[in-house]
Amino acid sequence: MSRSRMLAMAAASAISICLPNLASAQGEVNVYTYREQKLIQPLLDAFTKDTGIKVNVVSASSGLEQRIKTEGANSPADVLLTVDIGRLEDAVQGGITQPIKSDVIEKVVPAQYRDPEGHWVGVSMRARVIYASKDRVKQDAITYEELADPKWKGKICIRSGQHIYNNALIAAMIVKHGEAKTEEWLKGLKANLAQKPSGGDREQARDVAAGKCDIGIGNTYYWALMTQNPKQKEWADATKVILPTFAGGGTHVNVSGVVLAKNAPNKANALKLIEWLTGDTAQHMYADQNYEYPVKAGIKTNDIIAGYGKLNPDPMPLAKIAEKKKAAANLVDKVGFDN
Ligand code: FE
């Protein structure tokens, strides 16, 4: 590692970092991550065990793209791990990525879950679903379009419309139905809200459990995590997960993913890590420790997640959803969704 990179890594330590010591014979790879280190560290430890490649981690909850940009040509960043097409797209738009060229990735990761130019790759999947009151919701199937039906008036809870998870869902709706119809849909959904959008996904289940609403909108893994959390288990117990579909069929799926940094100093090792993340060991860990859907075919989904029913992902490429990111954000403002 050059002196300037060492300095950049040292500066990074203000957040959270494993300081680089002597690299092993296999060298090292520097990972910047928005993903909670608690979730990601077991994966990275397993990678080191498999390959002998040491992993240095910089973890933060915001600002990593800007930081990689500021570090410029001397950035120690090799890869950035993040969630959601929105954040992957932000990294690409920020000019901090380079194409990932890998036959392994192209074979394992379905085309809809990676950038056509290779600037981002999805490594695990999650669906945007309904946490429905077990007592008050009788139906076991629902469409996203139906969320705007007046029959749900005062019964829906959701986090901010500007959160990336909702942004992607709204963007997908735009791809399906166009902006004008999506605006109507969003107005209808807003009219059905029980309360002002707030909290995270789990809080929507909490509020369903408390009787404030009948259905909450959240990601698949949060419900599984609630079942494992003594304080939140009752929120899961009060709700059932329904996998919604768009009117034409297909559930909205997003990814956690990775980009290869533009100036990656350890590019070969970075590619090894990215490929490893789509391999069997990592895919089983994504499934059973993070409760995400494996992106690799043939890897078993965790039983709790499988219990939601069979996932039929909407075939829409995430790159198409990324194109409507801004339009979706504008609509949320326009209808005053969060007001
Ligand atoms: Fe999340």
Image (cartoon, rainbow, N blue to C red):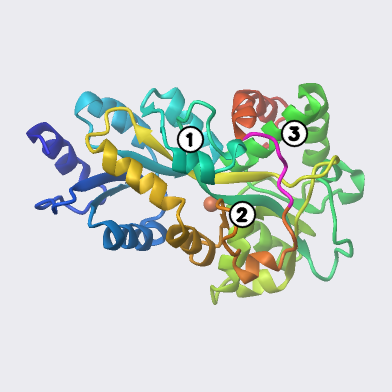
Q: Cβ of disc 2 within 8 Å of ligand 1?
A: yes
Tell me if I can see residue 50 in this picture: yes
Q: What is the distance, in whole Å, between disc 1 and disc 2 at their CAs?
A: 20 Å
For the residues bearing labels 3 and 2, Cβ distance under 8 angstroms: no
- The magenta-colored residue range is 312-317
Question: Eyeballing the image, is 231 above or below 306?
Answer: below
Q: Nearer the viewer, mark 1 or mark 2?
A: 1
Determine the image quadrant of residue 132.
bottom right
Q: Main secondary structure of the magenta part?
A: loop
- Spatial CA span between label 3 and label 2: 20 Å
Q: Position of residue 69 (x, y in %)?
A: 30, 26
Q: Identify residue for label 2.
A: 201
Residue lying at 64% horizontally and 64% vertically, measured from the top left = 305
Residue that appears at 36% across and 35% down: 260
Q: Is residue 149 left or right of residue 93?
A: right
Q: Is residue 142 above or below residue 206?
A: above
Residue 258 among magenta residues: no
Question: Which amino acid, mark 1?
Answer: Leu
- Where residue 326 appears, as percent x and y from the top left, is 60, 24
Q: Residue at x 22, y 24 (%)?
A: 73
Q: Earlier in the sequence, mark 3 or mark 1?
A: 1
- Mark 2, secondary structure of its residue: helix
Picture quadrant of residue 98: top left
Q: Could you say whether the residue bearing mark 1 is in a helix, strand or loop?
A: helix
Q: Secondary structure at mark 3?
A: helix
Residue 96 in the image: state x and y as whole percent. 36, 27
Location of mark 3 (residue)? 173
Q: Which residue is mark 1?
A: 88
User: Residue 158: x percent and y percent?
Assistant: 69, 49
